[in-house]
Image: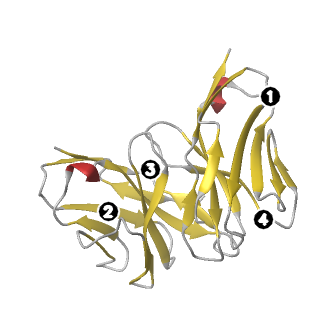
Amino acid sequence: QQQVKQSPQSLIVQKGGISIINCAYENTAFDYFPWYQQFPGKGPALLIAIRPDVSEKKEGRFTISFNKSAKQFSLHIMDSQPGDSATYFCAAHAGTASKLTFGTGTRLQVTL
Amino acid sequence: EPEVTQTPSHQVTQMGQEVILRCVPISNHLYFYWYRQILGQKVEFLVSFYNNEISEKSEIFDDQFSVERPDGSNFTLKIRSTKLEDSAMYFCAREAGQANEKLFFGSGTQLSVL
């Protein structure tokens, strides 16, 4: 019940295209859903996050869509750039000061 | 973004040896975390540490692991007798945000057990 399922495992998108990564969860106690971006050899960096009281959050080219009834959320990267090539992890968090449960990661490659 | 500095960036050790990984948070917060990431896999929670005590730990965090904040600043993860399967990237993290919901990770320590 603590799992967060993420798909796809890898994704290749052309420059300028839309990258979409999906996650699903079971635990209804989760109340905060961040996305992290990780470059090789670096720590995960917080990209964008959402709480379940809103269905969408947009920051620049990055948008989270959240479907509370389906217990699913997704990351959309508009106008994908080669610099976006990285591994993306969704995660979920229950309450304050508690651990994050990460998805299995999506390796995104944006080609020219 | 609140900084978390980790040392060393790389550590190579022989199986059975003890290692100590260090984390230096910049500001004075009480909640800290250790996570690990085996190469190519997801980030996994190890332990959370609040006000100088363990508040939660995962099944990975067995008796070989311990955490301390010995001088009130540095936050350490000790692996008493390393195994080959301990080879991973270890990340320290601290919380921020109004409800302490945002987690900021250090750049990690790559541990290689030979």
Label number found at residue A51? 4
Which image quadrant is residue A12 in? top right
On screen, residue B30 versus residue A27, left or right, reads: left
How far separated are the C-alphas under marks 1 and 2? Answer: 39 Å
Disc on res. B107? 3
Residue B2 visible to the viewer: no
Q: Of the residues tagged 1 and 4, which is closer to the observer?
A: 4
Q: Are marks 1 and 2 in contact (CB under 8 Å)?
A: no
Q: Is residue B61 left or right of residue B27?
A: left
State which quarter of the image contains the N terminus of chain A.
Answer: bottom right
Do the residues indicated by labels 4 and 2 lie within the same chain of the protein?
A: no
For mark 2, what is the residue? B22
Q: CA distance from mark 4 to mark 3?
A: 26 Å
The earlier-in-sequence mark between 3 and 2 is 2
Whole-angstrom CA distance, mark 4 to mark 2, is 32 Å
Element class at badge 3: loop
Name above or below for residue B100 compared with residue A5.
below
Amino acid type, residue under disc 4 in the picture: Arg
Task: Please identify, in this view, whether the residue under mark 1 or under mark 2 is nearer the observer.
Answer: 1
> Label 2 amino acid?
Arg
- The amino acid beneath tag 3 is Ser
Which mark sits nearer the N-terminus, 1 or 4? 4
| Chain ID at mark 1 | A
Alpha-carbon neighbours of circle 4 within 10 Å: few (<14), some, or many (≥20)? some
Q: CA distance from mark 3 to mark 1?
A: 28 Å
